[in-house]
Amino acid sequence: MALVAAMASGEAGHIRDILAAVTPGGGKSLLPVIAAHRLIAAGLVERVVWVVPRDSLRLQAEEAFVDPLWRATFGHALSVRAADNERDPARGLAGYITTYQAVAAAPALHRAEAQAHRTLLVIDEVHHLPAPGKPGAEEASAEDAEAGAWSRAMLPVMEAAAYRLYLSGTLERADGKRILGLPYRPAALGRGPELDLDAPGLAVIGYSRAQALAERAVLPVTFGAIDGEASWLEGGRIAGDSPRVGPHRLGAGSVRVTTRPALFTALRTGFARDLLSEAFHATKRLRARRRAERDLPPGEPVRGLGKLLVVAPDQASARAYLETLRGWMPAGQGARDVRLATSGQGDAHAALAAFRLTPEPAILVTVAMAYEGLDAPEVAVVAALTHIRSRPWLEQMLARATRVDPHAGAYDTQQALVFHPDDPLFARFRLELETEQGSSIRPRRERPVSAVVPERTRWRDDDEPAGITPLESNAIGLRYALLRPRLVEPAPAAPAPELPSVTERTLRQLLAAAVAAQAVEDEASLRVPRGSNLAHRYNAVLKRVLGKGRATMTLPELEAALGWLERNRLSDHLDCLDGDARYAWSARQRRGRWPPERAARR
């Protein structure tokens, strides 16, 4: 990583904080290894302390440091240990791994360790830590109270550390609060919190999903959207005169009035069984196909066949799903191949470890323990039987299936398959994902706060919409959609000569798509400050650089323009708009958001 090398050499000696905004599944667990190796070798730090949100992730963090491939690639021999709240948690190694819960239980211990040794503090999934609220403010729930306790305990440890590496697959919290330790700009009227990416001492590493797909670091996703109908009783009454509602479609109607109750009902009645069946049989077909391709006999345990992750809305539903799945298998096979991992299970961590590291079990049912940070590349199918629709949560769940499996063969033969209810909230999430990774050419619009953070208030497991009583539901339709990046390249030559006007129109469309793709990528990867219509500005930049607009270009000029875009970034030429009154606001924004030395270079 060039940034850490510059810090180690003194070229970036002013940097103390690194924010790594890496798309879920994009390999952010490699960054602490690189940073610790370079900074310890340079004598800038003495040890690394890696804090994770759950105990199940400590083992994965240990594995990152002992991975033989990474050790050979970077030439390091560092080791860290998963520590409890005991004295000398590093035990002579290069550092230790702990959890937010452990730090909250013994904050003085971890603060003293950070003060006694020059420490690189790795804050994993930092979005779990809300910035402290106003004094005297009450926590909204037990979950919020726990997160607040984590933040209060982590703050002095963060202040004592010499360097801080913030890791996250999302820079937004579902509740809209600011994230602990990250700098923010003054709040603008009608907008949510906005990170100050040019804060002194902060360096930002962005790795978007579009970039990861282009580099084949993650897999494209095929969505299996399943529509259905549901009926329920209002008010939770069971008497004969209770009003029956429905059947209502999941994919139609008002989100507040019918979609949420219908979804709540569907996840606990026949629709859930139908979706489970689709995911189960898709996994079964995948495993059978891969066995046949390798000439493997049935039943032989082997890695790389593909696994199924089932995400349930609550623990009671998870147990019901477990019994349903086991009922579709012979008794012995069901007990071996299907495991449950919830906070109420005593063997949850053992089930997670077996699912990650061994050929069996092939199916894991969970609620939230495995949706974030689970490093199980064999997951090829996800049954998204969850009611939560916050974007960060859904992106994390999606990422469980998008990791490339080294045991499953060539990249082109792998694909993530996610079955989900076809409701408007999930459809909105998919549209946003398509737009940001460049697979949709729909123009980007300024979104209100409620769309930036789709679920300000999480719909919790114990919140039954209006106290409804689920009656019945069923699936009524399935449609597939492949989410992959749009490739900006000329169309293959046709066997017959093409009319010049058709060729011109095609090249102009490709130019427009290339400009839009750069705009989407630059905003997603934080290359330029957000604000106004970036694609419109980029079109103006292209016209200034090439001397004319594409509407008046000849065929050779259009081809030359397309070639220029393939070799250059429009963000490097935004200074062409300086002095133009139509873009004065954009120029002021750029000067205000970039540091003076960078603005001078531009």
Image: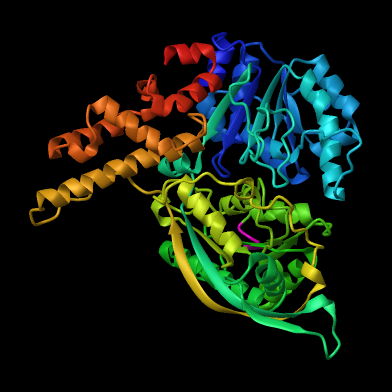
Q: Taking 198 as reference, is 176 left or right?
A: right
Q: Quadrant for the C terminus, please.
A: top left
In front here: 199 or 68? 199
Residue 581: name its quadrant: top left
Q: Judge whether residue 10 is colored magenta.
A: no
| Image: 140 above or below 277 | above
Q: Is residue 380 visible?
A: no
Residue 240, can we see it? yes
- Residues in magenta? 359-363
Asked which quadrant contains residue 358, the reply is bottom right
Q: Where 421 sits versus 192, above or below?
A: below
**Residue at the image point whose x is 59% and y is 66% from the top:** 423
Q: Quadrant of residue 267?
A: bottom right
- Residue 239 located left or right of residue 552: right
The spot of residue 164 in percent (x, y) is: 69, 23
> At 74% from the left edge and 24% from the top edge, which residue is drawn?
93
